[in-house]
Image (cartoon, rainbow, N blue to C red):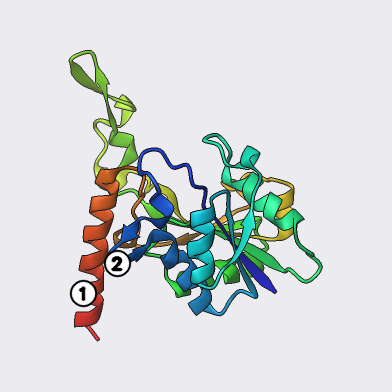
Amino acid sequence: MNIAIIPARGGSKRIPRKNIKAFCGKPLIAYSIDVARESGLFGRIIVSTDDAEIAQVAKARGAEVLMRPYALADDFTGTTPVVAHALTCMDLDAVEAACCIYATAPFLQTHYLQAGLEKLLTCKADFAFSATTFAYPIQRALKRSGDGVAMFYPQFAPTRSQDLEEAYHDAGQFYWARPQTWLAQKAVFSPQSVMVELPRHLVQDIDTMEDWTRAELMYKAWREHSLSVR
């Protein structure tokens, strides 16, 4: 059996009540729960939360709820300890793999979840996680310098962009691993992990209201395009 664990604390600061705020017509966390159910990959879908309202929304969408201790719900607790806590609350003998799915992933697709599980098992990796490419060469990144600007890596100023190595970043959607890997709290980003590459138009962090507006516009455009090509 595989299980999905969706961390969803109630104390988001920059976007209050973010995990259950209405996103294009339904609570944001509903997208993650729904795609996990539709995938058919999971014997259990568990939302780990400290918040009664989030718990109510999660149950209404068909997920189980695990109320986590407040010590694991502050602004500094990472994802891995939350997933590890959830795993310690269940019988692991029948669990082959556990997938952490973020509650803020409205673009998540079932076939990418499936690809992640397949990569985890076939590559014998510690983690299989979603990633995408940077839209612009990171070697040409700029920073403020007094009243002007400077390059982070000035040695690449004369290098053609097509000659620069492509860079990737975490897409913030899902992370597959075996229970023992989560419990050991290994590093997700390491040579023992593998990426599932997503197209950039299906990736958007949602940390600020500007992010939220952009994500809704992207989602609406993507849905309209998907319907038009059917």
Image quarter of residue 25: bottom left
Query: Which percent across, then down, holds residue 142?
Result: 26, 29
Given residues 219 and 176, the one toward you in this image is 219
Query: Which percent across, then down, holds residue 219?
Result: 27, 64
| Dot placed on the residue nearer the N-terminal end, 1 or 2 | 2
Query: Which residue does the image show at 75% across and 57% down from the upper left?
Result: 89
Given residues 37 and 221, the one toward you in this image is 37
In the displayed structure, 149 sits above or below 93; it is above
In the displayed structure, 86 sits above or below 92; it is above
For badge 2, the amino acid type reads Gly
User: How busy is the neighbourhood of tag 2: few (under 14 within 10 Å), some, or many (20 plus)?
Assistant: few
Query: Which percent across, then down, holds residue 33?
Result: 49, 68
For badge 1, the amino acid type reads His
Q: Quadrant of the N terminus?
A: bottom right
Query: Which residue does the image show at 54% across and 54% down from the upper left?
Result: 52
Q: Which residue is mark 1?
A: 225
Q: Which residue is mark 2?
A: 25
Given residues 35 and 225, the one toward you in this image is 35
Which dot, 1 or 2, sits closer to the camera?
2
Query: Which residue does the image show at 73% across and 68% down from the upper left?
Result: 95
Query: Which percent across, then down, holds residue 106?
Result: 38, 63
The answer for how far apart the CA atoms under marks 1 and 2 are is 18 Å
User: How busy is the neighbourhood of tag 1: few (under 14 within 10 Å), some, or many (20 plus)?
Assistant: few
